[in-house]
Image (spheres, rainbow, N blue to C red):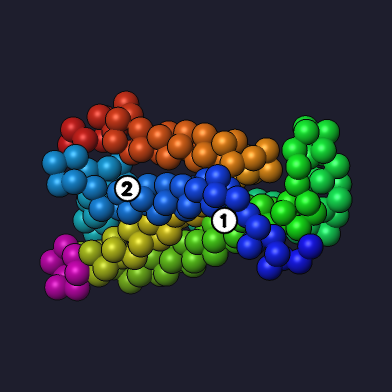
Amino acid sequence: MTVIDTLLNINMMDLFAFAGLILAWLLTGWFTEHPPAHRPSVSVLMNDYRRDWMRQFVTREPRIFDATVVDSLRQGTAFFASASMIAIGGGVALLGNAALVKGLAAQLALDEGAIGIELKLILMLTFLANALLKFIWSNRLFGYCSIMMAAVPNDPADPHGYHRAAQAAEVNITAARSFNRGLRAIYFALAALGWLAGPLALMNPAAFTAGILVRREFASVSREVILHR
């Protein structure tokens, strides 16, 4: 059976589960980044704190703390980028030995062809590849931010001081947004693994993952703390 045959013969439940996963991923990301005005998400609330950070940065002396924070953020992106690369390598190795996964599926009483298994692994790998690209870009943006912070005058009377600080804040926010997108991609890559056990096993983790992310952004204890400025 070819890949084209597999795509043509895929059943409606699998299509529905696949569409549900993609829709949950897209809507969760959009809702997190564009929340209702009366109920901002944690990500949006943290943007204001990042702007406050850069305003305080103008007059802070010495700036060792700020350098440490940015370095910590870059290390976080580098760690997740490395982890994503390792996971992608493992997934590609499984693709090269789909018969092994097919044997596992047979033990679980699942009727899956090797190509069907490969397509499901490719879905997970697509999410991981997306996460890797987001983490790499986030790491680079935090690097840009550190350079822009170094260009901020340490004198509040300097006409360029707060303007450059505001620019650094926006780059920092963009880097954080890319990092958060990478994390969401990893969450949904884990949910995509459920497809190996069938369409229902994909829909349930997808809904659970979306619910967890929405709760953390809109109904968590940390949000209540962050909200009260």
**Horizontal relation, residue 75 to residue 176: left or right:** right
Q: Residues within 10 Å of mark 2 (few under 14, many from 20)?
A: many
Q: Badges 1 and 2: C-beta atoms under 8 Å apart? A: no
- Which x, y percent locates residue 229? 17, 36
Q: Residue at x 68, y 38 (%)?
A: 197
Q: In the structure shown, which secondary structural element does the residue marked by tag 2 occupy?
A: helix
The percent position of residue 108, horizontal first and vertical second, equals 77, 32
Residue 180 in view here:
no
Instruction: Name the residue type under label 1.
Output: Phe
**Residue drawn 14% across and 73% down?**
159
Label 1 crowd (10 A; few <14 / some 14-19 / many >=20) = many
Taking the magenta stretch, the answer to whether it contains residue 128 is no
The quadrant the N terminus occupies is: bottom right
Residue at numbered disc 1: 127
Q: Nearer the viewer, residue 225 or 100?
A: 100
Chain-order first, disc 1 or disc 2: 2
In terms of secondary structure, what is the magenta stretch mainly? loop
Query: Does the magenta run of residues contain 158?
Result: yes
Q: Residue sitting at 68 percent across and 68 percent down?
A: 4
Q: Residue at x 68, y 43 (%)?
A: 196
Amino acid tagged 2: Thr
Compared to residue 182, the image places residue 148 above or below, namely below
Along the viewing direction, whichever of 77 and 44 lies nearer the viewer: 44
Residue named by callout 2: 32
> Whole-Å distance between the Cαs marked 1 and 2?
18 Å
In the displayed structure image, the side of residue 2 where residue 161 appears, left or right: left
Can residue 103 be seen in this snapshot? yes
Q: Position of residue 210 (x, y in %)?
A: 43, 40
SS at mark 1 in the image: helix
Span of residues in magenta: 156-163
Q: How many marks?
A: 2
